[in-house]
Amino acid sequence: MIVLPAVLAVASLLLPPAIVQDTLTVFAASDLQLPFGEIAPAFERATGQQVILVFGSSGALATQIERGAPADIFFSADQRYVEQLAEREVLYPGSHQVYALGYLSLVTRRGSGMRLRTLADLAGSGVKRIAIANPAHAPYGRAAEEAMRRAGIWDSVEPKVVLGENVRQAVQFVTTGAVEAGIIARSLAGDPALVAIPVDPSLYDPILQTAGIVRRTAQLELARRFLAFVTGAEGWAVMQRYGFSRPASP
């Protein structure tokens, strides 16, 4: 398994032809970094095929795919980006589906002395900075802003908000002590450096994580197999462990 950051997505075009032809390139939202770090090697063992993982914010990855980045399949943290690609005929017809429901967690750094119980506590004077992913292109950032608005604290906490390029960077801001708190994907909240509290799901719209196979892929069947593996028994056991739940209609 090869893992690349989103900024290197186009660089896979420069890989030796044998590697490009014999691998499945998976563009995936940053909240999937930990579960896919387990699922991809399991898929490789089961199939004998190599997987290249490219992580980034869903919006940024969707833009790269539309511009020709060499993805075979796209796992977004948000339904809208996949649907937009489908409408523009970038995806293989009928290939997109909701594969999981995601959730938010409120986190602080373990040992920091911060004691937060609800989003309302973010308005307190002890919290100087709050990390979220950039709502402009990161679904978990948009959900975090939405949750703070519905909780009635957005106007008071907006000056404290620090934007990460993606949700993984928001986690890093918390674990390094650059900020006092963060609102992140539950799938990343199990980091032992963090103390996590679930955010009430009624405060944000459902996070419908959606995947689609890129139309120009030369690995259509392998992409289908990977999607089936993620949502199948072995892959789903990992996804569930990281806090995802199944959609009503897989």
Image (cartoon, helix red, strand yellow):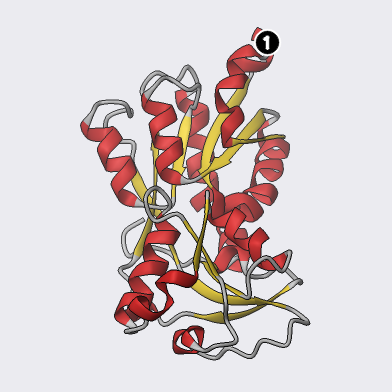
Residue in view at x 46 percent, y 85 percent: 123
x then y, percent, for residue 236: 55, 58
Whether residue 198 appears in this view of the structure is yes
Residue in view at x 60 percent, y 55 percent: 168
x then y, percent, for residue 240: 56, 66
Within 10 Å of disc 1 (Cα), the crowding (few <14, some 14-19, many 20+) is few
Whether residue 100 appears in this view of the structure is no
Question: Relative to residue 53, is residue 193 drawn left or right?
Answer: right
Viewer-nearest residue: 96 or 66: 66
User: Is 123 placed above or below 74 here?
Assistant: below
User: Is 248 placed above or below 74 here?
Assistant: below
x then y, percent, for residue 212: 38, 38
- Element marked by disc 1: helix
Viewer-nearest residue: 38 or 11: 11
Q: Mark 1 points at which residue?
A: 18
Give the quarter of the figure containing the C terminus: bottom left
Residue in view at x 54 percent, y 34 percent: 26
Give the quarter of the figure containing the N terminus: top right
x then y, percent, for residue 244: 50, 65
Q: Quarter-wise, where is residue 155 in the image? A: bottom left
Query: How many callouts does the rendering have?
Result: 1
The residue lying furthest to the top in this view is 17
User: Is 97 placed above or below 88 here?
Assistant: below
Viewer-nearest residue: 210 or 104: 104
Q: What residue type is labelled 1?
A: Ala
User: Is 68 placed above or below 154 here?
Assistant: above
Residue in view at x 46 percent, y 67 percent: 245
